[in-house]
Image: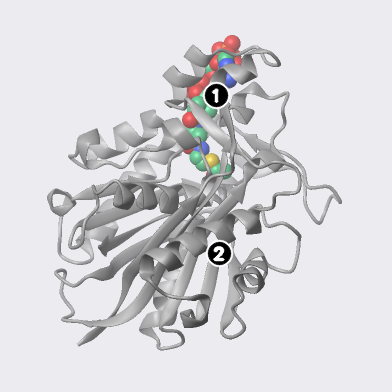
C-alpha cells in the first residue's frame, strides 16, 4: 500500500470588481484588441479597498470545505501559496486559519510566485505522505493589483486578483498510476534569471514596489520549460503525454498555453483555460482553473490531470494527479 494525497474538495473566489480591457483605454496607450490578441485576456477581477489576499483565501477555502463536506476543525494544516500576503508577517495562512475558526494544526505560506501552487501542492503532499498531517487545505491567493505600476502598459493589463483552494487528504493506494491522488511532480528553479521578472521593492527598500517584467524573455523560457517539466513529471510514473486527460496550466498568456499544449500533443479541448476571465492571477491561477473545470463538470473522478507553471525566480514545475 502507498499513501496518496487525494483531492476531496475544491473551491474558488473572485473579488466583485470586474475590470474589462476597455477600462485601460482611458488611462493608457492600449486597446482591448491589443490585449486580447497578444494575451487572450478579456477581463480580470481586482480587490477593493480594505480587501486583503487573506480575505480572498478564506472565501476560497470555505468553498472547498463545503464541497468536501468538512469543517475547518477537520483540517490539520493550511499551505498557502502567495507573493502578495497582506503583511510582511504573520503569514497569510495563519490569518486564514484564524478567520476559518481553526484552532488546532498549523499554517504557513509558500512563495514561488506563479509556480507557488505547484510548490504548495508538493509541500502538502510531503506532509501527508510522511504522516505529519492527514487533511491539508492548499490555497493559491493573490492581489497582484496591489503591486502594479499603473503607468506601465506592458504589465498592468496582464494581472488579476483571486483565490482557489483544494482540500487533499491521505488515503491508501496501490502504488501504481491508477491510484487517485498526487502521483508525481517535478520542481525547478534557477535564480540566475531574477532580473527578468521581479518586484522592485520589499524589506530591503522600505516600500512594497512594483512588478517588473521583460515579457519577451519570460515568454522565451516559458514554453520550453513548461513542456519539459510536464514531460518529466508524467514520465516519472511510467505514463506519457497521450495518457493526460486534462492539462491545467498556469494562466499567463493564451499563446503560451496553446504552444505548450500543442507540444504535449493536445489541443485546447483538453486544456482548462480561464485566462480570458481572470487574467494572470499568479499562484491562484491553477486552483482557480481546477475549481472552474470541476464545477462545470469537465474534470471528473479518475481523470489524469497535469498542472504546470512558471514564474519569478525563475521557478517552475508540474504536478500530476489523478482526480
Ligand atoms: N498595449 C499596447 N501595446 C503594448 C502593450 C499594451 N498593453 N504592452 C506592450 N505594448 C507594445 C510594446 O511597447 C511593444 O511596442 P514597440 O514594438 O513599439 O516597442 C509592442 O507592444 C510589442 O511588445 P512585446 O513585449 O514584444 O509584446 P509581446 O508580443 O512579447 O507580448 C507579453 C507581451 C504579453 C507580456 C508577452 O511577452 C508575455 O506574455 N510574456 C510572458 C509573461 C508570462 O508568462 N509571465 C508568467 C509569469 S508572471 C509571474 O511570475 C508573476
Which image quarter holds the C terminus? bottom left
Q: Which mark is residue 209?
A: none
Q: Secondary structure at mark 1?
A: strand
Figure quarter occupied by ligand 1: top right
Query: What's the residue at 46%, 47% (across, down)?
Result: 285
Give the number of the mark in front: 2 or 1: 1
Q: Nearer the viewer, residue 293 or 263?
A: 293
Q: CA distance from mark 2 to mark 1?
A: 28 Å
Judged left or right of residue 235, residue 91 is right
Write down the residue under mark 2: 80
Tell me, yes or no, if residue 31 can be seen here: yes
> Which residue shows up at 23% across the image and 47% down it?
298
Q: Is 314 rendered above or below residue 3?
A: above
Q: Residues within 10 Å of mark 2 (few under 14, many from 20)?
A: many
Q: Quadrant of the N terminus?
A: bottom left
The circle on residue 20 is: 1
Q: Would residue 234 be found to the left or right of residue 213 on screen?
A: left
| 151 to 48, vertically: above or below | above
Q: Give the x, y percent position of residue 197.
A: 60, 41
Instruction: Out of 85 and 52, give the one closest to the viewer.
Output: 52
138 is higher (above) or lower (below) than 3? above
Amino acid at each position: 500500500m502507498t499513501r496518496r494525497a487525494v483531492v476531496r474538495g475544491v473551491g474558488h473566489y473572485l473579488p466583485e470588481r470586474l475590470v474589462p480591457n476597455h477600462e485601460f483605454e482611458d488611462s493608457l496607450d492600449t486597446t482591448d484588441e491589443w490585449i486580447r490578441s497578444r494575451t487572450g485576456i478579456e477581463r480580470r477581477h481586482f480587490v477593493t479597498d480594505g480587501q486583503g489576499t487573506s480575505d480572498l483565501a478564506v472565501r476560497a477555502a470555505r468553498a472547498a470545505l463545503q464541497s468536501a463536506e468538512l469543517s475547518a476543525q477537520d483540517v490539520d494544516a493550511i499551505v498557502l501559496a502567495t507573493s502578495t500576503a497582506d503583511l510582511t508577517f504573520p503569514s497569510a495562512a495563519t490569518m486564514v486559519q484564524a478567520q476559518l475558526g481553526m484552532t488546532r494544526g498549523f499554517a504557513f505560506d509558500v512563495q514561488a510566485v506563479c509556480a507557488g501552487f505547484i510548490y504548495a501542492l508538493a509541500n502538502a503532499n510531503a506532509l501527508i505522505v510522511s504522516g505529519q498531517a492527514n487533511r491539508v487545505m492548499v490555497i493559491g491567493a493573490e492581489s497582484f493589483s496591489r503591486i502594479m505600476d499603473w503607468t506601465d502598459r506592458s504589465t498592468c493589463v496582464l494581472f488579476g486578483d483571486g483565490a482557489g483552494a483544494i482540500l487533499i487528504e491521505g488515503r491508501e493506494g496501490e502504488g501504481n498510476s491508477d491510484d487517485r491522488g498526487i502521483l508525481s511532480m517535478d520542481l525547478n528553479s534557477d535564480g540566475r534569471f531574477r532580473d527578468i521578472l521581479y518586484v522592485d521593492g520589499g524589506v530591503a527598500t522600505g516600500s512594497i514596489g512594483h512588478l517588473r517584467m521583460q515579457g519577451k524573455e519570460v515568454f522565451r523560457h516559458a514554453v520550453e520549460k513548461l513542456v519539459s517539466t510536464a514531460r518529466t513529471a508524467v514520465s516519472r510514473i511510467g505514463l506519457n503525454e497521450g495518457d493526460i486527460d486534462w492539462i491545467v496550466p498556469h494562466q499567463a498568456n493564451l499563446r503560451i498555453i496553446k504552444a505548450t499544449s500543442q507540444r504535449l500533443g493536445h489541443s485546447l479541448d483538453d486544456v482548462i483555460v480561464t485566462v480570458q476571465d481572470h487574467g494572470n492571477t499568479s499562484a491562484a491561477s491553477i486552483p482557480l482553473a481546477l475549481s472552474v473545470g470541476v464545477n462545470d463538470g469537465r474534470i471528473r473522478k479518475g481523470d489524469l490531470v497535469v498542472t504546470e507553471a512558471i514564474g519569478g525566480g525563475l521557478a517552475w514545475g508540474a504536478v500530476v494527479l489523478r482526480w
